[in-house]
Image: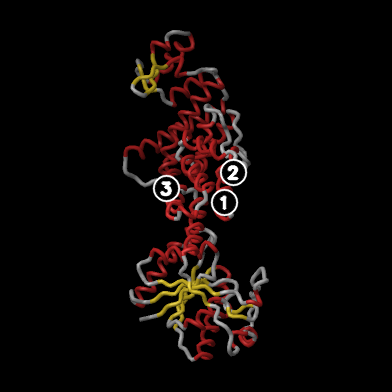
Amino acid sequence: MAKVLFSVISGADPISYCKDGPMLHLCRWVKPNVTALFLSGDFLEYHKSDDRYRKSILELGKRIGHEFEILIFEEEGLENPHVFDAFYDTFEKRFSEIFQKYGDDAELIVNLSSGTPAMQACLATMAINDPHKIILKQVAVAKSDKNRTEREKNKEFDFETYWETDEDNEPDQPCRVIDIENEAFNKRVQKELIAEHVRKYDYHAAMLVANSIRNSVSEDLYSLLKIARWRVQLNSRDYLAELRKMKNKVPGIENLIPYKSDSERPLYEYLLSLSIKLKRQDFVELVFGVTPMLFNICLYALKTMANLDVRKQYCTFTRGKWYLDSGKLNRDDDGKAILAELSKRSSFERQFLASWQMILMLEYFDVNEQFVKTAQELRKVEEDIRNDVAHDITAVTEEIIYGKTGWHASEIVEKFRKMMKMLGFDVKSGEKWDSYEIMNDLIISRIKG
């Protein structure tokens, strides 16, 4: 049975401050048959320039009389090493390659002392869930190094000097390898996973993880996660109730929702939800969101720019839907003029209230010309792609959105943002527009606190 050490390479490797780095120390004491090195960023460049990691392992093999097979995973272009999702698929692929090459009965030992915290959390999570035999190990910091606050900068690496001054080569040096089996560590990993989900605005996934370690999650943190999940679902009844409960428990929590009134809050929160869909590249939901956003922003604009409550004045409410009513439109001069314009577009007796009708009304009342023009552009977006998506099984990508509408997804959200600004809403970057990020920071501070 093969014993394989999998190690991300980072700043302390292979030798730092006259001691083995975590990877080399595990090679020394675990004596794997195979050492698989995961190299990215600067560390891949170091490997290419002076071969320091492979040379150190081979020299150690000579010193201790052990033959190491070395497997190099060169990860070109791996970005965002502090983000969980940036490398999960890559790690999973590498694990699969190892078990394919050395058999499903191989013992995979994973070094959790090298790599970013998110990398470590990712590796630990995979180990917990993988059906193969995966053993987690760390390397303790040497007593003499415990007061050091940063790793040695070893861009330039004189192999002979580093090797000769490595104190772990001397007799009777202690083993610093730690087996990881305790429940506390698994909970720490799960908390890091909650933080990663929050950073991605995936509050449902964060709640699932929180529920799996419920006894280790504080009431304040759990309430904040519930608020975030309800908020992204636009469930104002529940998140407002929870906010009231937490008002005196979490400083600043009352400022999480930028607009408090029932007329302003739903519109602003819906726009923020569209911006979240854009950040998550959830293009299908973004496209579906164009119709209700355009409808409600036009409804609000008629009230505030034209002093017209169109539902109250010209509509009837039947079986849960609002209908424009020709009888009500015929009661006043403005209504008659609007009805005449509507009748030019289609035969009119009674129709569902829709954004195109309200755009026509905004034109009639001669409100902000730029607002009407932007509304018309968004109405065309709705016609060009939203209806296709609603009726056909089709992929929705950035390229498809641009191809059908002539606008990038970010431009669609920006058009709504400009309309909101014309209506008097604060949409500049800051406390109101970045309120989801402020909420995320508050949640993560509770995770780490």
Q: Is residue 110 visible?
A: yes
User: Whole-Å distance between the Cαs marked 1 and 3?
Assistant: 36 Å
Vertically, is 273 above or below 183? Answer: above
For residue 63, above or below residue 318? below
Q: Is 16 in front, or is 382?
A: 16
**Disc number placed over residue 446 in the picture, else none:** 1
For mark 1, does the 10 Å Cα neighbourhood hold few (<14), some (14 to 19), or many (20 or more) residues? Answer: some
Q: Nearer the viewer, mark 1 or mark 3?
A: 1
Whole-number angstrom distance, CA of label 2 to CA of label 1 = 10 Å
Residue 80 on image: x %, y %: 54, 60
- Cβ–Cβ below 8 Å for labels 1 and 3? no
Q: Earlier in the sequence, mark 1 or mark 3?
A: 3
Quarter of the image where the N terminus is located: bottom left
Q: Nearer the viewer, mark 3 or mark 2?
A: 2
Which residue is farthest left? 392
Q: Which residue is mark 2?
A: 250
Residue 399, image x and y in percent?
Answer: 44, 47
Q: Position of residue 77 (x, y in %)?
A: 51, 64
- Left/right placement of residue 120 relative to residue 426 reads left
For marks 2 and 1, the one nearer the N-term is 2
Q: Earlier in the sequence, mark 3 or mark 2?
A: 2
- Could you tell me the amino acid type at mark 3? Thr
Disc 3, SS? loop
Q: CB atoms at circles 2 and 1 under 8 Å apart?
A: yes
Q: Is residue 408 visible?
A: no
For badge 2, the amino acid type reads Val
Q: CA distance from mark 3 to mark 2?
A: 40 Å
Q: Which mark is residue 397?
A: 3
Judging depth in this view, the residue of 87 and 224 nearest the camera is: 224
At numbered mark 1, what does the secondary structure look like: helix, strand or loop?
helix
340 up-or-down from 392: above or below: above
